[in-house]
Amino acid sequence: MAMKDEENTANTVPCSVMLTDEKIYICHDEQENALIRQLDSTKLEYVVRLLVDPQYQYYCVIVSERFMIGLIVN
């Protein structure tokens, strides 16, 4: 289970996730100019866990063999 830390949101970025047959892409949605910028991607085979906050359904943590990302997905 992932728990959103309301007091420490400086390290979170509103973003979206795009899923293909081979990869997951993490993108930042720029609200001011309607642009979508890719932040990172990883192969699906590297994703080892997906944690979702039960109280904030749009907050999740994707745990990869390479890194751990906290996401707020709108």
Image (cartoon, helix red, strand yellow):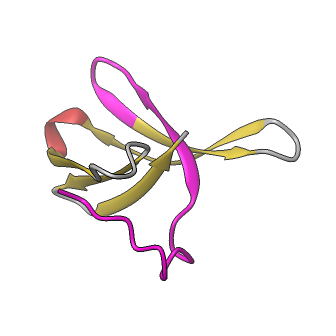
Q: Residue furthest bottom?
A: 7
Specify start and end residues of the magenta stretch as a single range.
1-24
Q: Is residue 17 above or below residue 10?
A: above
Kindly identify the residue that appears in the image at 32 percent across and 43 percent down.
42
Q: How many marks?
A: 0
Residue 35, x across and y down, in percent: 77, 38
* Residue situated furthest front in the rendering: 55
Closer-to-camera residue (34/58): 58
Q: Residue at x 56, y 46 (%)?
A: 15
Location of the C terminus by quadrant is top right
Q: Is residue 19 above or below residue 31?
A: above
Predominant SS along the magenta part: loop
Residue 37 in the image: state x and y as whole percent: 66, 44
Please state if 61 lies on the left or on the right of 49 as rendered: right
**Residue 20 lies in quadrant:** top left
Above or below residue 33? Residue 11 is below
Q: Nearer the viewer, residue 52 or 37?
A: 52
Q: Position of residue 18 (x, y in %)?
A: 45, 29
Residue 38: x percent and y percent? 58, 44
- Is 13 included in the stretch rendered in magenta? yes
Left or right side of 20 for 7: right
Q: Residue at x 51, y 66 (%)?
A: 12
Quadrant where the N terminus sits is bottom left
